[in-house]
Amino acid sequence: MDEEQTLKDLLAIMHENDLDALKIKVGDAIFELVRREPGAAAAPAAAAAAVPAPSGPAALAASANVKKVTAPLVGVFYRSAAPDSEAFVKEGDRVETGQVLCILEAMKLFNEITSDYSGIVTRIVPENGELVSLGQELFWIEP
């Protein structure tokens, strides 16, 4: 079954069962679908608020001036363009607005994620190769 048909089938299941979200693994592919109300604008801040905050000893508190770069789509997080390439950025690096921070792979497409902010990368949240959700924090940047 091709990915387009799988997506159509999953959307039909969501509609028939009045689901707001659906995450399913089909073979090696993971599909995560989230319903939005018609006419609702995608608000990154609202999407980030929907992601539960980490807790326990691994939780870190961000300072008040930290800007957070969040995932604009569901995909696999990669810190570099190829396994043997150097990472786009490392913690402690200075970045400029528009600079490529990482790649998110979604349905065999590689999407460059750029910074909306200038500053110092103080934290890289996901591990290389980790599946990230829409709105999940990727980077913390301090001016």
Image (cartoon, grey):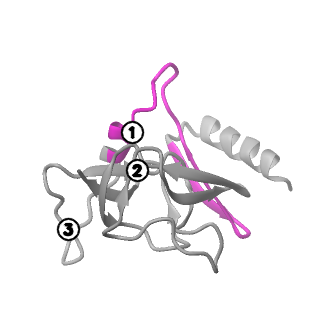
Image point 85% across, 53% down: which residue?
A: 2
Three-letter code, disc 3: Leu
Query: Does the magenta run of residues contain 47?
Result: yes
- Identify which residue, 59 or 79, lies in the foreground: 79
Three-letter code, disc 1: Pro
For label 3, the SS is loop
Q: Earlier in the sequence, mark 2 or mark 1?
A: 1
Q: Earlier in the sequence, mark 3 or mark 1?
A: 1
**Residue extent of the magenta highlight:** 21-48
Label 3, on which residue?
A: 60
Task: Specify the quadrant that holds the N terminus.
Answer: bottom right
Q: Which mark is residue 44?
A: 1
Q: In the drawing, does residue 34 fall left or right of residue 105?
A: left
Label 2, on which residue?
A: 70
Q: What's the CA distance linking mark 3 and mark 1? A: 21 Å
Q: Position of residue 91 (x, y in %)?
A: 34, 70
Image point 40% across, 54% down: which residue?
A: 136
Q: Position of residue 132 (x, y in %)?
A: 49, 60
Q: Position of residue 121 (x, y in %)?
A: 32, 62
